[in-house]
Amino acid sequence: MRQQWFSLLAAFAGCGFLMATLSAQDAEVVIGEYRVPSEYPPGELGEIVKLGREIVEKTNEHPLSKAYVGNALTCSSCHLKAGTVPHAASFLGTATAYPAWAPREKRVITLEDRVLNCFMRSQNGVRPPKGSQVSIAITAYITWLSTGSPIKMNHEKSLGPNHVKPLKIKPELADAKRGDTLYANQCADCHGKAGQGTSEGPPVWGEQSYNDGAGLSQNDKLAAWLKVAMPLDEANLSEQDALDIAAYVNSHPRPQFVLKAHLPKPERLGVYDW
Ligand code: HEC
Ligand code: HEC
């Protein structure tokens, strides 16, 4: 099988030896003009890009990142397959949008800022210092996923070209009670009846989940993400079902976001430490 992919890729792109370091699955991921690059950069840069991917896949366990994580999630819990699944909060082309205007922060932010902010909210943890190894590795990995794509800085919001598209349905139409039944039938097997998570899926509410400052804590954002990402491998919810389930999931308690609690000590906020 491996051999087959190898020759297929070699024939396709004419650089099989370098491509052997990537999985065949990655080499096929394309969204419009954006694609997962066919090879890692040479030398230390390539090593850092690979390190970034490892951290994105194992954020809550990786020795470089776990101290900054306050729940049972990884970046890949929401940016499926390390951000390489088209439309499921993919990282393809993301780096082309930065620096970008961030309405939430009311200032222009870099890609590194955007990465670090996800630690405070979606990961319910502490913002790693700018310039730290974890920060540079993840940012390098995400930037690598924009290889060859032209920069189009986003002056409206801090989102890349392949961000999750909002639903058309109005958030006021959410029916959490209906969502309760749908959750029991379509989600509880993997995420647990009490949202606590199982070996098949991470927690979706409670202490080990994203906090109420995270994008997904807003029903419309969670619904839009569910529509393209869940149930895993067969995302097929209608807009109404996605919204109802989102309202049900978010009706449960989760950690509260208080900005001060998620910032490192002032002297660690901007150091270059490695
Ligand atoms: C609980 C879910 C969740 C987790 C965990 C999470 N994110 Fe996100 N992240 C989101 C959502 C939702 C968005 C908005 C994406 C969209 O609208 O397409 C987002 C946006 C982003 C963006 C901007 C994407 C763009 O298109 O510009 C980056 C970069 C990012 N996250 C990085 C990370 C990193 C790095 C981690 C791990 C440290 C992480 N995220 C963990 C949910 C999550
Ligand atoms: C077959 C098992 C499975 C089913 C069914 C499933 N999920 Fe998931 N879900 C997962 C896995 C696994 C992840 C994490 C993805 C990863 O790490 O690769 C995930 C991630 C999530 C996340 C983001 C991370 C978090 O825990 O907050 C949410 C929210 C979520 N699922 C909600 C749902 C909802 C709602 C449904 C029902 C419509 C559903 N899932 C159905 C397995 C499943």
Image (cartoon, helix red, strand yellow):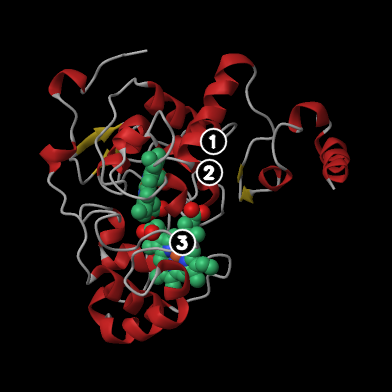
Label 3 belongs to which residue?
201
Q: Residues within 10 Å of mark 1 (few under 14, many from 20)?
A: many
Residue 117 locus on image (x, y percent): 28, 39
- Tell whether 225 sits left or right of 85: left
Say which element carries label 2. Answer: loop
Label 1 belongs to which residue?
146
36 vs 202, nearest the viewer: 202
User: Are circles 1 and 3 on residues that touch, CB within 8 Å?
Assistant: no
Say which element carries label 1. Answer: loop
* Cβ at disc 3 under 8 Å from ligand 2: yes
Q: Is residue 160 visible?
A: no
204 vs 23, nearest the viewer: 204
Determine the CA span between mark 1 and mark 3: 29 Å
**Residue at screen point 26% across, 16% down:** 271
For residue 183, which quarter of the picture?
A: bottom left
User: Are circles 2 and 1 on residues that touch, CB within 8 Å?
Assistant: yes
Determine the CA span between mark 2 and mark 1: 6 Å
Say which element carries label 3. Answer: loop
User: Are circles 3 and 2 on residues that touch, CB within 8 Å?
Assistant: no
Q: Is residue 244 visible?
A: yes
Residue 77 locus on image (x, y percent): 44, 53
Mark toward the start of the polypeptide (2 vs 1): 2
**Residue at screen point 86% across, 43% down:** 8
Label 2 belongs to which residue?
92
- Tell whether 146 sits left or right of 204: right
Picture quarter with the C terminus: top left
**Residue at screen point 66% across, 44% down:** 26
Q: Is residue 53 placed above or below 163 in the rendered structure?
A: above
